[in-house]
Amino acid sequence: MAQILPPLPALRAFESAARHLSFARAGGELGVTPGAISHQVKQLEEWVGGQLFKREANRVVLSETGRILANKVNEIFGQIISAGAAARSAENKSVVHVRCQHSVAAKWLAPRVSEFLDSNPDVAVAVQAGPQRWNAAEKVPDLSIYYGRGSVPGYREALLLSGRLIAVASPELISKLPPLMAPADLLNRPLIEVSFNEPGWYDQGWEAWFAAAGLGHVVPSKSLSFSLLHLAIEACIAGAGFALVPDFLVERELACEHLVDVCSFTLPNTQPYYLIEPDPKSGRREVELFKNWLLEQATRHK
């Protein structure tokens, strides 16, 4: 069944007259005569089936029906105004397109990006998490965050995230084990491995960590492996084992005590992430703003 809408011009005239409690001022606001406002109000009264205004001396006041309708109309008009403002704002936003390695997007960028948006309400950020290599036919992003590819013609690179590798575990797992004092205590514990399946990536891994701790060449048994760092982190939080991860990816988890640094021994991360942009630069204000914000966020970690 078709909805029977009120005469919309009459609704607009009524809203103005109810707000001013004057047909003359409503007519001035809408650029019509007081008589035209009166005519529109009569049309609306016929649709409602009741009187909307009462005349008292030289002024008009709302009837009870008019008061109820005015409250509803004000609310609806307010929603329409807000919706229009939101639509215009969305249309006018400048968008920064960012392509980012999965784990950095999930564990480093996503938890922080609201801070940038709060300070830059006229800028939108579109993040696409994806592998290191992508189809050359795809649109070139404004910025990318990946491990260093060396000198690539047509691109600039700036070191963004380096940090150190630390061994972490959930408090629940630690509570079930004897006190852990040194890296050697992890040799027979459940270890989570990160096994990257992209060319150029390698797991710096537990072997390098144990060797740096002075234990020589050991090949510990791993009970679980993942192809992405953030999956290893989630499994670690759930108590599946110990994980070796860059410290900048678990800042929140350490602060909230969802994870603990089990022995305070660290290893320099030899696979840092770089902020990559096309060269020459776009010169767009929003891209420069976001790039500088990213570099500032990385500096806070150092």
Image (spheres, rainbow, N blue to C red):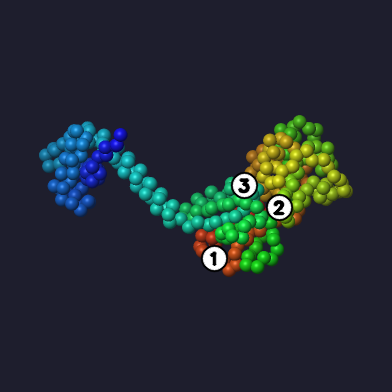
Q: Residues within 10 Å of mark 2 (few under 14, many from 20)?
A: few
**Residue 62 visible within the image:** no
Judged left or right of residue 156, residue 184 is right
Q: Is residue 162 above or below residue 176?
A: below
Which residue does the image show at 63% across and 56% down from the upper left? 134
Q: Residues within 10 Å of mark 1 (few under 14, many from 20)?
A: few
Which residue corresponds to mark 2? 198
Secondary element under disc 1, as helix, strand or loop, is loop
The reply to whether discs 3 and 2 touch (Cβ–Cβ < 8 Å) is: no
Which image quarter: residue 156? bottom right
Quick one: 239 or 18, which is closer to the camera? 239
Instruction: Give the amino acid at mark 2.
Output: Glu
Q: Is residue 195 above or below residue 175?
A: below
Looking at the figure, which quarter contains the N terminus?
A: top left
Judged left or right of residue 237, residue 280 is left
Which residue does the image show at 72% across and 49% down from the upper left? 196
Which residue does the image show at 20% across and 53% down from the upper left? 31
Q: Position of residue 153 (x, y in %)?
A: 65, 68
Secondary element under disc 2, as helix, strand or loop, is loop
- Mark identifier at residue 150: none
Report the residue that reaches farthest toward the top.
Answer: 176
Judged left or right of residue 36, residue 274 is right
Which residue corresponds to mark 3? 106
- Mark identifier at residue 282: 1
